[in-house]
Image (spheres, grey):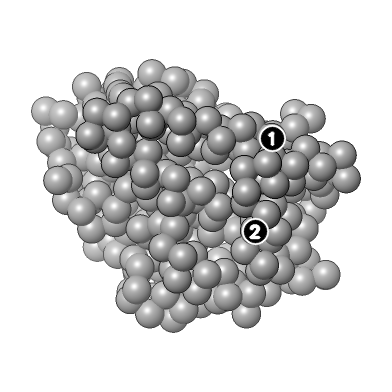
Amino acid sequence: MNPVVEKYGRILLPLITPYDENENVDYGKYEELINYVIEKDVCDSLIVTGTTGEASLLTFDERVKLFETAVKAAAGRKPVIAGTGCASTKETIALTKKAEECGIELCLIVCPFYNKPTQEGVYNHFKAIAESTKASILLYNIPIFVGINMEAETVGRLAAIKNIVGVKDEAGVNPTQITDFYLATKDVDPDFALYNGDDVMLLPTIVQGAMGIVSGGAHIYGHEIRAIFDAFAKGENEKAKELFVPMYEFCKSTGQNGRILPNSILRPAIEAVTGVKLGPARSPLAPATDAEMEVTLGILKKQGKL
């Protein structure tokens, strides 16, 4: 088995960040959510301040405190991965160092956003971060949010750096890019880990060689995701499809009305299933409407999740 997947598993869950009525981070509810997902065994590892955790809407200090909270709450029961990507190389290095101080050994680092660097700029960014830390790094490619795509050639170059151990790709934007990443890295580092980062692309990317998934939907569908991987490994393709379709329907519903980040609908859906009060998404994300929730909760009820 791939050593990264062996240590961190196939299902990496990017935790939702709970807020109170004033949009302050609710660290107590965060601990409650962590206990829920660990006790229900819906994932193999926890990701703190990923996209689903609304990293771009959190302050530096909030992110550090969430790292600390997660490590304490997980208490060694599941590995904790820190999302440490920021717009600048300097701040990303600083946040990665904080994660390392918390005892976190793997950082998920998004391609720098807003400033749209060249591929050489992307390479230099990750090279500088890797040289600044002993932590391992999982590259994170999500063009729909950062504004640029991390090209396969760049990922291949970065795979040669010892502590850059894998990539998470938002496959819905580039449906075949997992294969491009595989071809670019297989001779550079045969142990380079390939993770899909888009719930609705779970089944298509397994076929292409994705070894696991970073899944916000795992809060609700973790057991199904595990069963899908197991079914595919056994050649039970029809079973894998049958398990995948309900999750696909749910995840598509969280993007109603052109929502790119699904959190506004995903949060109350997770709250309804888990019973953990998460609060609405942080501004400027608009709250889910009654009509949107009628659709999404209707799907969950139809599937027996509620």
Give the answer, above or below, for where 252 lies relative to 45.
above
Q: Label 2 vs label 1: CA separation?
A: 16 Å
Q: Which residue is mark 1?
A: 253
Q: Quadrant of the C terminus?
A: bottom right
Give the answer, above or below, for where 113 lies relative to 245.
below
The residue drawn where x is 38% and y is 18% is 176
Q: Position of residue 77 (x, y in %)?
A: 34, 73
Q: Position of residue 259 (x, y in %)?
A: 73, 34
Q: Position of residue 190 (x, y in %)?
A: 13, 36
Using residue 119 as the reference point, say whether residue 69 is left or right of it: right
- Mark 1, secondary structure of its residue: helix
Q: Earlier in the sequence, mark 2 or mark 1?
A: 1
- Mark 2, secondary structure of its residue: helix
Disc marking residue 3: none
Residue 157 in sight in this render: no
The kind of residue on which mark 2 rests is: Val
Residue toward you, 108 or 78: 78
Q: Which residue is mark 2?
A: 273
Q: Position of residue 155 (x, y in %)?
A: 30, 31
**How many labels, in total?**
2
